[in-house]
Amino acid sequence: MKKILVTGALGQIGTELVMKLRDVYGDQNVVATDIRQVDNDVVNSGPFEVLDVTDADKMFEVAKKYEVDSIIHLAALLSATAEKNPLLAWNLNMGGLVNALEVARELKCQFFTPSSIGAFGPTTPKDNTPQDTIQRPTTMYGVNKVAGELLCDYYFYKFGVDTRGLRFPGLISYVAPPGGGTTDYAVEIYYKALQEGKYTSYIAKGTYMDMMYMPDALNAIIDLMEADASKLKHRNSFNVTAMSFDPEEIAAEIRKHIPSFELDYDVDPVRQSIAESWPNSIDATCAKEEWGFKAEYDLTKMTEDMLTKLREKLSV
Ligand code: VAH
């Protein structure tokens, strides 16, 4: 990757990924785009363009203007929002993806877009979910992710586009909040623990989901994109994970730092049903074997860092 176009650059992943990519590849070599403009480091530390990913002509124009050789396509609606607006989600998630793939094909760009554990469904083996298995998701987000994986593989086989992807678990970060996801509780709980000493979880006790700290997710994207193509048996998309926990386990870890922290429940049936359709834990062996994936943060190490960084951010 030398000159990179990032869509959805102001989202949870994009906000940190753009800054990391600019550290690695140079500020002027990372073109950040999003449907809106704000006054922050992403916009002010390098090239920024307002881009609606459903506008194919504009996307091509921006990619051509900066002569990009890589596209990291992040713009999408997440699972809970997609379930509230399924047709909007289809149009944005699939329309935006096709536009980005077409630009990558025409300009011969390397291509990355995230998939998700949401690409699995109720009939997928739930524990230690394999890389290659049944994928019959029951959410619009999951349908988008499976279709996206298949489309990205198609562009590789049919047109030779160097497409690569990761099935991300829930991502936890202290910089930009997630928006409209099912796993967002695992971010909110840290903020509420510091601000109020308690949290009411919309996900039920005993509901296990794979999770990953954002630094590991950013490294995984760069490591995959820099991996030797001849070593890749899979492309779209690799299972990756760092940990799996339920609300009780993350609360117990927080209590090691805030002993009085209280957790209770007010389960959201929509997000609970989405969570129950996903695996309890996935197997990341292929990512480890094919391109050396390794997560540095477990629940203990992530909790220490999240609470330390949030204390500074929230001045508490
Ligand atoms: C969501 N954070 O909750 C995203 C992610 C695995 C979860 O895809 O929709």
Image: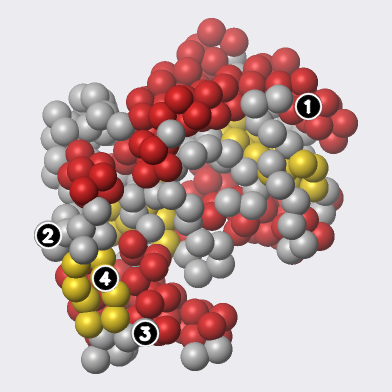
Mark 3 is on which residue type?
Answer: Glu
Q: Name the residue: 55% across, 62% down.
A: 176
Q: Which residue is mark 2?
A: 206
Mark 4 is on which residue type?
Answer: Thr
Q: Are marks 4 and 1 in contact (CB under 8 Å)?
A: no
- State the separation of the CA atoms marked 1 and 2: 46 Å
- State the separation of the CA atoms marked 2 and 4: 15 Å
In the image, residue 150 sits, relative to residue 254, either above or below, namely above
Q: Is residue 293 visible to the viewer in this orientation of the structure?
A: no
Q: As drawn, which residue projects farthest toward the right?
A: 65
Mark 2 is on which residue type?
Answer: Gly
Point out which mark residue 200 bears: 4
- State the separation of the CA atoms marked 2 and 3: 23 Å
Q: Name the residue: 77% across, 20% down.
A: 57
Q: Is mark 1 within 8 Å of ligand 1?
A: no
Q: Which of the two discs, 2 and 4, labels the residue nearer the N terminus?
A: 4
- State the separation of the CA atoms marked 4 and 3: 11 Å
In the image, residue 36 sits, relative to residue 186, either above or below, namely above
Point out which mark residue 31 bears: none
Q: Which residue is mark 1?
A: 58
Q: Which of the two discs, 3 and 1, labels the residue nearer the N terminus?
A: 1
Q: As drawn, which residue projects farthest toward the top?
A: 158
* Residue 287 screen position, x and y as percent: 37, 41
* Residue 62 screen position, x and y as percent: 81, 32
* Front-most of residues 215 and 84: 84
Mark 2 or 3: the one toward you: 3
